[in-house]
Image: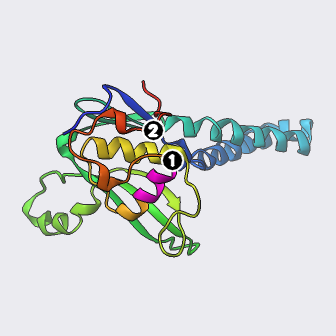
Amino acid sequence: MNTAPRHQTVRLGFLWRAAGAPIGCVLALAMGIVLADSGDAGRMGAVPALLLSSAAVLGVALPVPYGFWLRADDHGLTLVRAFVPRRYRWRDIQGLTMDAGQDADSGAHRLVLLLRLTPARRRTARAARTARDAHLYGPVLGILGTTRDGLPRGTEPRRLAELFDLLRRHGVPLDDRRYADLVLTAHGYPALAHTAPGASLSARPAACPDAA
């Protein structure tokens, strides 16, 4: 596949803004139970105990989005989610699934970004199911809100354009070309139709993505 810079990193924190909230809430609940059992909550008062629990939520939730990023190099991609890295070879990456739909609970329209991989070989009894689910096999990169028609709700973060540009320059197909083109061109990147194999870096906008 085509190579971009030797190392190129895109931060995905904007896709995982609330990722740390559940962990923070669990920590705050555990802290509240400990304070109640030890009697410290009664001694310090309800307001200080509440402030301490809120600080625990924020202390976990705020740093977590910085632990989501994607790095490309000559051999493949390294995806880091919540500071845990996973490595994927270029030959195992089949595309970026962009699954538009509605949230089952809220009914909000959304777009799920999934790095589609070549399914691992399964036993014969599971071969049929693997074939049906092949287009959904891989790690989720994040979820975006969309309009009812599955289009961007406004100007999406520049990091999303950087993500699409990184993938397309390595020959990774993007499923929803309409959505991708709207995001790319809004930030000065060429549309997908203008991306040819072996495209040079000079086609990138002047404000290039972070490199690491």
Q: Residues within 10 Å of mark 1 (few under 14, many from 20)?
A: some
Decide whether residue 83 is among the magenta residues.
no
The disc placed on residue 83 is none
The amino acid sitting under disc 2 is: Pro
Instruction: Say which residue label 2 marks.
Output: 205
Q: Is residue 62 above or below residue 184?
A: above
147 relative to 173 in the view: left or right: right
Q: Is residue 182 magenta?
A: yes
Using residue 93 as the reference point, say whether residue 180 is left or right of it: right
x 25%, y 62%: residue:
135
* Lateral position of residue 90 relative to residue 211, left or right: left
Q: Position of residue 70 (x, y in %)?
A: 40, 37
Using the rendered image of the protein, determine whether residue 115 is visible from the camera's viewpoint. Answer: no
Which mark identifies residue 187?
Answer: 1
**203 over 177 or under it: above or below:** above
Magenta segment main secondary structure? helix
Alpha carbon of mark 2 to alpha carbon of mark 1: how far?
8 Å
Q: Is residue 85 in view from this perspective? A: yes
SS category of the residue bearing label 2: loop
Look at the numbered discs 2 and 1 and tell me whether their residues touch, using CB distance below 8 Å. yes
> Which is nearer the eye, 208 or 12?
208
- Magenta-colored span: 181-186
Residue at horizontal 70%, vertical 43%? Answer: 28
Q: Residue at x 44, y 42 (%)?
A: 162
> Which corner quadrant holds the C terminus?
top left
Q: Earlier in the sequence, mark 2 or mark 1?
A: 1
